[in-house]
Image (cartoon, rainbow, N blue to C red):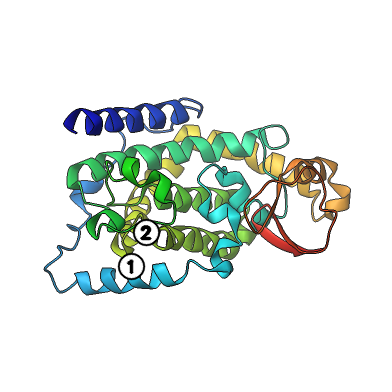
Amino acid sequence: MKAKKLLLAVVAILTTTSVWAQYPDPFLSEDERPDGIVWLPDPPSLTGGDFANDFYYYQWGKEQRKEAWMADYALWDEGIDLSHVFSPCLGIGLSHETTPEILLLVEAATGDAHNANFNVKNYFKRKRPFATFNEPSLKPEEDEEEAQTFSYPSGHSSRGWMYAMVLATVAPECTEKLMNRARIYAMHRVVCGHHWKSDIDASLMLVAGVFPIVVTSEAYQAQLKKARAEYQKIKGGGATSAEAPAANEAKAKTPIYDLQGRVLQGEPTSKGVYIQNGVKFAK
C-alpha cells in the first residue's frame, strides 16, 4: 500500500511538471517571488470554530452538482485550458495562433501563481474535503490520485485569479467580467469537493500578494505593451466581431460540447442546449 501511494505521488508530480513545462518561464525568480507562508493564516482545524464555514460550503457544494453548474463545462473539466474559461469575458477567442502575445503574458504570470501556491500548499499539507470525509468528489475516478495531494490554498483558484487580473491589465474595461468569472471558477473547486471555502479565500489572498510584484517587473511591462497592442488590433478600436476575422476563426475552432460533456464533431445538428467557450447557447 505504501509503495502504491508513493507511486501515485510521483505520478502527480511528474504530471504537474510535464504540464508546466509547456508554459513560458514565469516572470519572477525564486528569490524575487514573495513567500505566501508569511502572510497567509493557518487553515482552519477540524475542531476549530472557524471550520463551521468550511463545513457549510462543503455541504453546499455537493448540492450544486446539478445541471445548473455542470452545464458550464469549462468550469469543471480540468482538461480545458483557462483561455476557454476567460475568452467570453473579452469577446475574443484566445489561442496561441490568434493571440500569442496575450497568452504569453498570462501564462508566464500564471506560472508565478502556480509556483507561489505550490510552496505554500506543501507547507500546510491540508487534506482535501472529499478525502477528509471519505466521500466521492465530483470526479470519483480521480479521487485516489487527488487524495495524495494537498488542499490549501487552491492551485486552480490561484491560477484563475492571476489569469483574470493579468487580462484586466490588457483590457481594463473587462475587469468586472473577468473577476466575476474567476470567482465562479474558484467556487467550482468547492462544488467539486476538492477544496474547502477557506482554500479559495486563501488563493485570492496569495495572488493579491504576488500580483503587484509580477505586474511591476520590467519583463511584465514589456510583454504587456505587446499584449495590449495585439488586443487593440483584434478589437479594431471598437470594431465588431465581424470585423475581427482572427477572433472569429479562433471561435470557430473552439470545441462545442453537449450537456453531457461530449465533444461535437462540428456544429450541432439537432435542437438543444450546447456549450462553447464556457457559454451556453441554444439551437
The x and y percentages for residue 215 are 45, 44
Q: Is residue 233 above or below residue 139?
A: above
Q: Helix, strand, or loop for circle 1?
A: helix
Tag 1 near tag 2, CB within 8 Å: yes
Q: Is residue 257 visible?
A: yes
Q: Is residue 31 visible?
A: no
Q: Is residue 83 above or below residue 134?
A: above
Count of numbered labels shown in the rendering: 2
Q: Nearer the viewer, residue 278 or 244?
A: 278
Picture disc at residue 193: 2
User: Amino acid under label 2?
Assistant: Gly
Viewed as shown, does residue 223 lie left or right of 257?
A: left
Residue lying at 59% horizontally and 55% vertically, measured from the top left: 73
Q: CA distance from mark 1 to mark 2?
A: 7 Å
Viewed as shown, does residue 194 lie left or right of 238?
A: left
Q: Residues within 10 Å of mark 1 (few under 14, many from 20)?
A: many
The N terminus, quarter of image: top left
Residue lying at 23% horizontally and 51% vertically, measured from the top left: 127
Q: Residues within 10 Å of mark 2 (few under 14, many from 20)?
A: many
User: Amino acid under label 1?
Assistant: Tyr
The x and y percentages for residue 210 are 35, 46
The x and y percentages for residue 277 are 67, 52
Q: Helix, strand, or loop for circle 2?
A: loop
Give the mark nearest the N terminus, 1 or 2. 1
Q: Please name the residue that numbered disc 1 is placed on.
A: 58
The C terminus, quarter of image: bottom right
Farthest residue to the left: give it.
Answer: 47
Residue lying at 46% horizontally and 25% vertically, measured from the top left: 21
Residue lying at 34% horizontally and 57% vertically, measured from the top left: 195
Q: Nearer the viewer, residue 1 or 197?
A: 1
Q: Nearer the viewer, residue 266 or 22?
A: 266
